[in-house]
Image: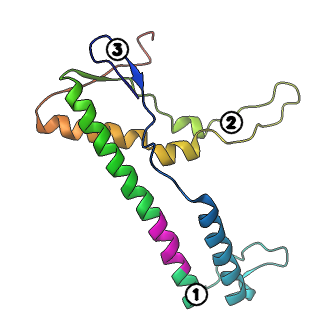
């Protein structure tokens, strides 16, 4: 994120205070998988993959773990929204003319690239987690919403027709 008050600029990370406990989430998901496998042993093929069309039974332990996982995601989403609201309020205090050069990063997560030497497909870690945790489109929507309250336009700079 870049802002320009009085011929200065700065970059700010979106939602810097968000800390996702990835270890805890992985641990809960492993526990959920083990619980699901022990409760429904007939729903899996011999190689460990899931059979199609089987009815699932969920234990109380699985449901508790599911609620715990859901609660962690809820807290992270709430914190992200709170951080974005603070940043939007700060941006609106900087000036009345707000311009955004928004590049769709979601498309980048789906692009596949190939290794030039051997032609193999490269690893697919392309901004997916970063976009999910930082939510740049959510920030833009919040800015648009708050500007509409003041009846001010949000100027979007077209990145395709104009050179940067």
Seen from the viewer's position, the closer of residues 105 and 139 is 139
| Few, some or many residues within 10 Å of mark 2 (<14, 14–19, 20+) | few
**2 or 3: tag closer to the N-terminus:** 3
**Can residue 32 be seen?**
yes
Mark 1 to mark 3 CA distance (whole Å): 55 Å
* Residue 37 sits above or below residue 16 on the image: below
Mark 2 to mark 1 CA distance (whole Å): 39 Å
Q: Which mark is residue 61?
A: 1
User: Dot 3 corresponds to which residue?
Assistant: 8
* Quadrant of the frame with the C terminus: top left
**Identity of the residue drawn at 50% across and 34% down:** 105
Nearer mark to the viewer, of 1 and 3: 3
The question of residue 25 being in magenta is answered with: no
**Magenta region, residue range:** 65-72
**Identity of the residue drawn at 46% across and 35% down:** 13
Regarding mark 1 in the picture, which secondary structure is present there? helix
On the image, the x and y values in percent for residue 88 come to: 28, 37
Mark 2 to mark 3 CA distance (whole Å): 37 Å
User: Dot 2 corresponds to which residue?
Assistant: 112
Regarding mark 2 in the picture, which secondary structure is present there? loop
């Amino acid at each position: 994120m870049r802002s320009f008050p009085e011929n200065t600029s700065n970059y700010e990370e979106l939602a810097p205070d968000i800390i996702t406990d990835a270890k805890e989430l992985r641990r809960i998901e492993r526990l959920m998988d083990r619980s699901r496998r022990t409760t429904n042993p007939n729903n899996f093929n011999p190689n460990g993959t899931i059979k199609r069309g089987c009815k699932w039974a969920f234990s109380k332990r699985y449901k508790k773990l599911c609620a715990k996982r859901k609660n962690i995601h809820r807290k992270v989403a709430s914190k992200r929204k709170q951080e974005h609201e603070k940043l939007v309020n700060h941006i609106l205090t900087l000036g009345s003319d707000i311009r955004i050069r928004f590049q769709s990063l979601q498309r980048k997560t789906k692009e596949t690239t190939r290794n030039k030497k051997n032609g193999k497909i490269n690893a697919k870690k392309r901004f997916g987690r970063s976009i999910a945790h930082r939510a740049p489109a959510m920030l833009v929507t919040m800015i648009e919403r708050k500007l509409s309250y003041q009846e001010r336009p949000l100027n979007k700079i077209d990145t395709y027709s104009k050179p940067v």
